[in-house]
Amino acid sequence: MNAQNDQHVSLCLDVERMALAMRYLTYLVVVFLFLLNYIQGSAMDLVVITIVLGLHSVFAHWVLLSGRHHLFLGRLNFIIYFLETSFVVKFTGAESSDAYIMYHLLLIGYSAYMPSFRKTMLVALLLAFSYAAVILIEYAQVGIEIPAGIIVVKLLSILLCGWLVGSLSDRLSRTQDELSGQARALAASEATLRTILNSAADPILVYDDNEFISEANDRAAELFGTPRQELLGRRLRAFLFDDGTRPQKMAALRARGAAEGQEVVITTDGEERIVEFTVRSFIRNQERFYVAIFRDTTEQKELQEATRLANVNLARLNRELKQVDELKTGFLATISQKLRSPLSAVLGHVEMLLDEELGEITPEQRRALHACRRATLRSFQLTDDALTLPKASPESVETAAQDPKEDE
């Protein structure tokens, strides 16, 4: 509504500026014709016209300079025009004056201020009555010089002009209301579409055949790292890494009308983002446009790469651990081999002493030898456990130790 009021005021200001220029031009023409005796009248008539036109022009200049433009839309401005027209017609010949055309111009101007058929017709009746009053005054003073039929035709022309202008202005007003309603509906639909686009989780762009961006949502602005208003009007290719195949991709997109793939987006900060896209074409106002939906997969790609590197490192660590384990096993096997031989010899001699093959022993010596035998067998068991081998039984150990006999 405010936009309509602003347009209406702007139109009225244009009309007033044009009317001001026409007043000056009309006054110069009237003076010129008066001096050439093409217009009959006295000097007093010229003075009255000069005063009337001058006062109206001063009023118009004052309103324009002071910014009180609302005065042009009030009744005072119409009354000034009405009186001015009547004075000019009266002092330029009344019924024989061609200035009666100013009544028609006043009707046309009024329709710009008040586009209403009923009010325009009321003004037409008022102007016709005013013209008739001017003619009656002229008749009472000096008489009538032209036939009454011509006067009637002039009066009817004012009414006919009012009817035509009123009908046209009324139709234009209805058309303007319809267009305003359509504009409001379009604005509402655009606002709804904007809300839908901004609520989308993925970046969305609309661009034309030359890749100029015509629409974008907030997610797209975040992806490309630039405000939405600055993004509109720029070319999409300015944000994409071009490996030299961009023309071929656009040609294939025009041919098929759809495309999917992966692109590298370069933001305004120089950051590279890996995105997957889906593009579909559509026709609007006989022009081809494309709507593209992007999905930022940079974090997913980075996670996949990090997982791959972690797997590679894990495999390397497994190989190193296997080598360490083999070294440990070999080391323990070597140590076990080095220990088992002297332990077997010790165990064999202990068995021989226990069997008194080397002479009789005292009970205290036998107890000490049994302790030594148990300690030696425990050493064999610890060695086998370190190698994760089955525990060696005393029998197998004794067999390995030169077939020693069992304890008594």
Image: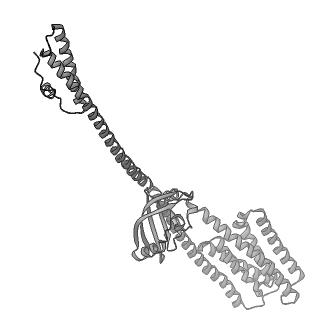
Q: Residue furthest right?
A: 43
The one nearer the camera, 314 or 159, is 314
Quadrant the N terminus occupies: bottom right
The one nearer the camera, 142 or 126, is 126
Quadrant the C terminus occupies: top left
Q: In the rendering, at what x and y percent does residue 160 appear?
A: 63, 83
Identify the residue at horizontal 85%, vertical 76% (top origin): 50
Identify the residue at horizontal 22%, vertical 19% (top origin): 375
Residue 10 sits above or below residue 320 on the image? below
**In the rendered view, does 75 fall on the left or right side of 203?**
right
Identify the residue at horizontal 56%, vertical 71% (top origin): 176
**In the rendered view, does 398 fall on the left or right side of 304?**
left
Determine the image quadrant of residue 162.
bottom right
Q: In the rendering, at what x and y percent does residue 8 appear?
A: 64, 68
Q: In the rendering, at what x and y percent does residue 37 appear?
A: 87, 90
Determine the image quadrant of residue 86.
bottom right
Residue 230 sits above or below residue 128 on the image? above
The one nearer the camera, 209 or 386, is 386
**Would you say residue 153 is visible in this rendering?**
yes
